[in-house]
Image (cartoon, rainbow, N blue to C red):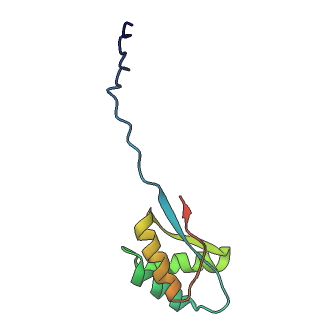
């Protein structure tokens, strides 16, 4: 019985990099949080958030019903989402960006 030769598939020299997906934190409008509270929470918990940007997003939340307040890696998104939720902001579920 003769052994058949082993054929090794050719390896590709290209490396395909796969990036981790980003996630969106979306705050929803509600009837019980004040503008001041929402803006303060955004400045407190979202890195790099300025008071002016927080007020822009707070107005968007109020007038359009929601705003994406941060986009980034899942682990950080989960933390910021939880922190804003603990401040009683109305949060949409995390979703892939």
Say which quadrant the N terminus sits in.
top left
In the image, residue 5 lies at what x, y percent? Answer: 35, 11
The correct choice, above or below, for 30 with respect to 7 in the image is below
The correct choice, above or below, for 38 with respect to 23 in the image is below
In the image, is 17 to the left or to the right of 34? left
Residue 59 seen in the current view: yes
Q: Which residue extends farthest left?
A: 13
In the image, residue 92 lies at what x, y percent? Answer: 61, 73
In the image, residue 14 lies at what x, y percent? Answer: 34, 29
In the image, residue 36 lies at what x, y percent? Answer: 52, 91
Residue at 53% x, 83% y: name it: 85
Q: Which residue extends farthest top?
A: 2
Residue 51 seen in the current view: no
In the image, is 72 to the left or to the right of 27? left
Location of residue 62 (image quadrant): bottom right
Q: Nearer the viewer, residue 75 or 84?
A: 75
Residue at 45% x, 64% y: name it: 74
In the image, is 43 to the left or to the right of 61? left
Q: Nearer the viewer, residue 39 or 78?
A: 78
């Amino acid at each position: 019985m003769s052994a058949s030769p082993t054929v090794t598939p050719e390896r590709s020299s290209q490396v395909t990099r796969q990036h981790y997906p980003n996630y969106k934190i979306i705050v929803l409008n509600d009837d019980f949080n004040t503008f001041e509270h929402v803006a303060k929470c955004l400045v407190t918990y979202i890195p790099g958030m300025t008071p002016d940007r927080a007020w822009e997003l707070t107005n968007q939340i109020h007038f359009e019903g929601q705003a994406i307040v941060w986009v980034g890696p899942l682990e950080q998104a989960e933390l910021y989402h939880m922190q804003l939720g603990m401040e009683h902001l109305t949060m949409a579920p995390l979703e892939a960006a």
